[in-house]
Image (cartoon, rainbow, N blue to C red):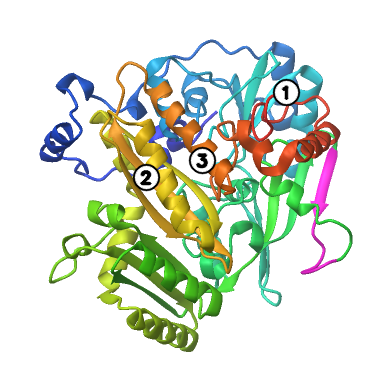
Amino acid sequence: MSQPTELFDPAARWAAPDPEPIVGDDLRVLLRQAFAIEEDGAGASPAAVVLEVAPSRLSLVALQALGAVVGPEHVVVEDAARAAHANGMSYLDLVRRSAAPPTVPDAIVLPAAHEEVGAILRACSEHGVAVVPFGGGTSVVGGVAPTRGSFDAVVALDLQRLDALLEVDDVSWTATLQAGVTGPRAEELLAEHGFTLGHVPQSFERATIGGYAATRSSGQLSTGWGRFDALVERVRVATPAGDLDLGRAPGTAAGPDLRQLVLGSEGAFGVITSVTVRVRPLPEVRRHEGWRVADLATGVGILRTLAQRGPKPDLARLSDEVETAMGVYSAHPPGGGTDEAGGCLLLVGWEGAAADVAYRAEAATAILRAAGATPLGEEAAESWRHGRFRAPRLRDELLGAGMLIETLETATTWRDLEALHARVGETLRTALDGASPIVACHVSHLYAAGASLYFTVLARRDGDDPVAQWSAAKTAVMETLTGAGATLTHHHAIGADHAPWLAAEIGELGVDVLRAVKARLDPAGVLNPGKLLPAD
């Protein structure tokens, strides 16, 4: 079967490589000195490891049954394809590749229609084959790991052929997209009709519409335009037990909203095949700019005022003192950058009709100036935007320099935000003591009641057992979050990594409710084993 090369190249899930590396030789030397990394502690990035692929365990009868649904040419068992679907893109995913060959799916199945997805799920249920729905493969919480569970074989259900814009309602401002449409492709298709979805997470280049819905994704404009789940009007789902077609009107009182059982379900209950979302006309004006504020507390106060009293920006992002000083996301405007001048970098942005953008920006500027913020201009925001999609590649290069680099995120109320910021930072520094840890953070995704905290951690990687090193740190953070009453995750989802703590957030009874839903929709339990729900 002929497939796009990038599908089977794990490195190609991110931005195309630049001609020159981001981390040059001089920076590598500085990193080794700053983090006390021995010369032999660096080397090739784990992301570049070529996987050893064990023979497929899919039985001939199951292979034939799947081929009868999608055509034999759309059931792929070649090693390269299977290796490309072996894991997501978290730090643990990558370092495990170096430690031992990970489990790879026994085949890749590529349906082209909703009806084929349902037939695949029924065939896998009948033949005892686990199914892992696969979009862009950008999960950072183990959400696409090809876990067999109690089954002899597992297949990756790759939705890339479900790639169409099915309908645009230019009266109601909605659009129906199939689940395999990527973020950039969705924008291209909608732009032809004068609309935009405007949902831009860091995984934008590879993530898909179905993945956005299955993980409750948030994008850079979520403060003003809403999280992805808030944009969903209708969702169609194939399950082993039948189809769900949920969402009839913009509002309803027809019992509990069952869309919420699907949104965030991570392929454990069914496979999302299409989503109807709210869209907006292409913006007349995009205005993004940077400001410097004295410290984190000042910036948080500004963001809370904007979120509660308005006018709310569409983009809002506040780097703490460490993230600002690192310069990873900051600009260097004329006269000195924010890292030289101290304080914190605050990014705000507005998109839409020219008059609306002008009104909101002017009102926000008055609030920022009254709080003592210093304008840095559009260059600061442009620098951040330019570097945002290079971050995964930078992570891979830093891994090759012997570094541990990973992210985690949460959300809490405004009352508790600064205290939680301090507690998580201290937890990470304590857990990674001896590895020269640096913990940076930014505040984003604003609500009237609170906001998200997104942490980036850098440390010297334990060359003997990097998996245990980070797992211990992540466990300590999860205990801190649950103890503080914060959420386990604001937008990375549960996956396999967060599943052990789900009961701490929704209660044992809540977990039982989800288990009952899964038992009804997926009686054989073939859908994405080990994800979302904690082990029995």
Location of residue 192 with respect to 403 vertically, above or below: below
The amino acid marked with disc number 1 is Asp
- Residue corresponding to mark 3: 480
The amino acid marked with disc number 3 is Thr
Q: Is residue 348 magenta?
A: no
Q: Position of residue 190 (x, y in %)?
A: 56, 65
Q: Nearer the viewer, residue 79 or 97?
A: 97
Q: Nearer the viewer, residue 67 or 481?
A: 481
Q: Is residue 9 visible?
A: no
- Write down the region rendered in magenta: 242-252
Report the quarter where the N terminus lies.
top right
N-term mark: 2 or 3: 2
Location of residue 63 with respect to 222 vertically, above or below: above
Q: Is residue 250 magenta?
A: yes
The amino acid marked with disc number 2 is Thr
SS state under label 1: loop
Could you give the CA–CA distance between mark 1 and mark 2, rounded to whole angstroms?
Answer: 32 Å
Could you give the CA–CA distance between mark 2 and mark 3, rounded to whole angstroms?
Answer: 16 Å
Name the residue at 52% across, 66% down. Answer: 223
- Residue corresponding to mark 2: 456
Q: Is residue 255 visible?
A: yes
Q: Nearer the viewer, residue 56 or 311?
A: 311
- Residue corresponding to mark 1: 536
Circle 1 packing at 10 Å, graded few (<14), some (14-19), many (20+), is few
Q: Position of residue 142 (x, y in %)?
A: 54, 32
